[in-house]
Every structure is written in C-alpha cells, then in structure tokens.
C-alpha cells in the first residue's frame, strides 16, 4: 500500500447519481456539467461513464476544457458540448474545429457569433440570459433585441439562465429569477430551455424546463449544501497513518504558537495535507473517519495532518478516510466554511487516483 493519499472515484455511483437526477427531473434532459476537469475527478473517465449512463449533452466552462472533452469522447461519442464561457472573440476557429456550442453571454459575443457565420450557415449557439445573478448573461433588453431581429445571423438551439440562490429554497431571488426566465422564454418559445443546476433541479417541477445542468450532485454533493440520502458519494479520499504519538499537556502541536494543548492527547499523523487538496483551515474544524468513528482533525499541514484518536488502537499503515461515504463532502464543506464544489475541485494530482465500479 503506497504511503500517500488515494482518491477513489466510483464510476458506478456517478452513473447512479445521473439516474437519480434523471428520475427527479422526470422528462427533462440531464446535461452533466463537467467543468474544472470533471469537478476535480477527471473529465475523461467521468464523462465516459456519464455517456454510458445516457448523457448526450455536456457543459464545460473554458474553451480548452471543451477541446479536451471532445478529444476524450472521440468520434464514437458525438455529444453536444456547451461552452459556458460563450464565444470569446478570436476563438471561432477552435470552436468550430471541436464542434463546441458557445453559450452567448453578452452583446460582444453575439456580434462575434454573427461574424462567424459561413457559407455553411450561421453558428449554432446557446443564449444565456441573466435573470439576476449579475455575473454573465444577456440582459433582457439585449435578448428582446435579438428576438425582434429574429436572431439574424445566428442559429440558437438553447435558452438558458442560472440561479444564484437555489441552494436556499425559500430565498426570494429564486421566484424572481423564475419569473424573469419565463419572460425571456416567451421571446424564444420554440427553443429548449434550461434554468437549473443541481439545487434548482430539486426545487420542484417548475424549475426544470427541458434540460437541467447538474454538476456537484452528480459528483456526490447534496443539492442543498448538506448531505442528501438520494445522492451517493463518488469521491473517497483516504491516506495511511505514518505515526501514532502521544502529545503531552502544555506542548504545541505542529506549526505556529496558537495550538497549545490543555490535555495530553493521542494523535495519528496521516500522510495527507493541503498539498493533496485538503483545506488547511480544516485543522480544529473538520473530522476524519477512523476505526468506525469520526475523529477531530487537529492540524492540516502541507504533507501531514494530525487527528485525535483517543485510546483507539492504531498502527502505521492503517488508513484514515478524509472524504467519502462516511464523511460526506457537504459536512467537510460546512466545517471548512465552503461548498462541496470547492472541496472537490481542490483535490490535487498528488493523491493517487483510481477508478472503480461498485
Ligand atoms: C457550474 C454551473 C452549473 C453546475 O452547478 P452545480 O451547482 O455544480 O450543479 C450549472 N450551470 C452553470 C451556468 C454553472 O456555471
């Protein structure tokens, strides 16, 4: 057993989560979002598994993510690949070459897309309308202009927007965004429509339209920023114990001057740290799973972390779970003041990756 952190990606659990999202979204297409290297779990293997489970449309953020996904899916898996970054001027040739579909997100991109029309016809694009995130997307006014012009010079195939507060179902922004999206849709009523990511998919039938775009819930995160029994863990991070030590009261543990021990404690020092993608601020907040119970994480350094194990027998080589079925990423995220998305995408290349089917 190598003395390093190991990231196990369960492709069967991923496929089951895809099936669960499909059942929840009943009738809507489930188009996985596999940006940032498949949420850190490897876009090649995860997108292949999702294709096998029935996915035919995918979303990525960056152009090079789209190119990599097209290469890895290859000619035998001709998926539709949408680019959330849209059409950055000057990238048309690459977009055409990899057959990507840009989600146009502002008037500059609309102009660039019109300029990209060829004898073969206008470019296939998606229209991203901003309904209240104020980050990217066409304004309602810009969308009305497009509609009035009959989307001249473009071949739109999808209308989408993105929710900013869906993880908080009672938040007033949700219904505001839904109303605005319905108005936008009345301008392009022939186009398939997509509003929701993972959280929105679970808000109810009104939110699902023709397509949902889950990312984090495919990869094991609950839709509402807490563990959800319908969603299975996909990523398991574990690492071996290197040393078992007792630290006396009055001593300091690890770096810095803050952590002086009030009591003597027994710790397992584990071969994982923030270089493996854990968050340093997990020290004193997060838990690890060892010998059938959650254990407090006391410190997270670059290569080593210490967990408090009481009197539990432990030996070098025993493995500690740092994320997984016993330690849901949402709990880890809550403990470290972030979201499951960040816990996933931080997983680094140092952890040895393996793919399994369960
Ligand atoms: C990242 C993203 C998603 C997926 O979000 P999750 O919360 O991971 O499900 C969907 N749509 C857009 C526009 C995104 O940027």
Image (cartoon, rainbow, N blue to C red):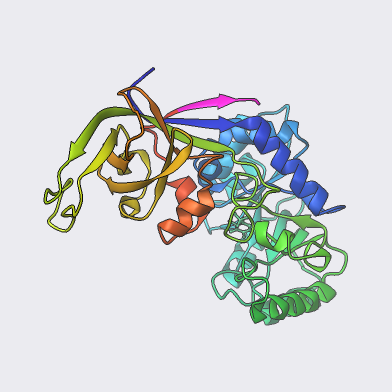
Vertical arrangement, residue 217 with respect to residue 357, above or below: below
Vertical arrangement, residue 19 with respect to residue 281, above or below: above
Q: Which residues are magenta?
A: 353-358
Residue at x 13% of width, y 49% of height: 252
Q: Is residue 179 magenta?
A: no
Residue at x 53% of width, y 47% of height: 328
Of residues 71 and 60, the one nearer the viewer is 60
Indicate the quadrant containing the C terminus: top left, top right, bottom left or bottom right. top right
Residue 319 image position (x, y, % from top left): 40, 28
Q: Name the quarter showing ligand 1.
A: bottom right
Vertical arrangement, residue 173 with respect to residue 299, above or below: below
Of residues 266 and 22, the one nearer the viewer is 266
Q: Main secondary structure of the magenta part?
A: strand
Residue at x 77% of width, y 67% of height: 152
Of residues 54 and 186, the one nearer the viewer is 54
Q: Quadrant of residue 309?
A: top left
Q: How many marks?
A: 0
Can residue 115 be seen? Answer: no
């Amino acid at each position: 057993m190598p003395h390093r952190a190991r990231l196990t990606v369960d492709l069967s659990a991923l496929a089951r989560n895809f099936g669960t999202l499909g059942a929840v979204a009943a009738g809507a297409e489930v188009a996985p979002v596999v940006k940032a290297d498949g949420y850190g779990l490897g876009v090649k293997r995860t997108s292949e598994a999702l294709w096998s489970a029935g996915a035919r449309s995918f979303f990525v953020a960056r152009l090079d993510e789209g190119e990599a996904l097209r290469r890895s899916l290859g000619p035998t898996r001709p998926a539709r690949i949408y680019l959330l970054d849209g059409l950055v001027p000057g990238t048309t040739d690459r977009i055409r070459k990899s057959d990507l579909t840009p989600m146009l997100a502002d008037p500059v991109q609309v102009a660039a897309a019109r300029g990209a029309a060829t004898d073969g016809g206008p470019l296939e694009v998606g229209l991203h309308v901003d309904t209240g995130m104020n980050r990217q997307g066409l304004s309602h006014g810009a969308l009305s202009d497009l509609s009035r012009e009959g989307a001249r010079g473009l071949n739109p195939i999808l209308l989408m927007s993105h929710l900013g507060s869906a993880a908080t179902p009672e938040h007033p922004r949700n219904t505001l965004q839904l109303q605005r999206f319905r108005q936008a849709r009345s301008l392009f009523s022939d186009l398939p429509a997509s509003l929701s990511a993972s959280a929105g998919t679970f808000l109810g039938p009104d939110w699902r339209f023709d397509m949902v775009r889950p990312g984090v819930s495919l990869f094991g995160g609950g839709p509402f920023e807490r563990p959800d029994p319908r969603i299975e863990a996909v990523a398991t991070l574990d690492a071996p114990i290197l040393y078992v030590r007792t630290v006396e009261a009055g001593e300091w543990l690890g770096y810095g001057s803050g952590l002086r021990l009030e009591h003597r404690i027994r710790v397992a020092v584990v071969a994982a740290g923030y270089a493996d993608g854990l968050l340093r601020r997990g020290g004193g907040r997060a838990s690890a799973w060892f010998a059938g119970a959650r254990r407090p994480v006391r410190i997270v350094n670059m290569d080593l972390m210490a967990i408090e194990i009481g009197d539990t027998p432990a030996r070098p080589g025993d493995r500690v779970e740092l994320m997984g079925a016993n330690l849901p990423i949402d709990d880890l995220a809550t403990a470290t003041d972030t979201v499951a998305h960040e816990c996933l995408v931080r997983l680094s290349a140092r952890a040895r990756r393996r793919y399994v089917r369960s």
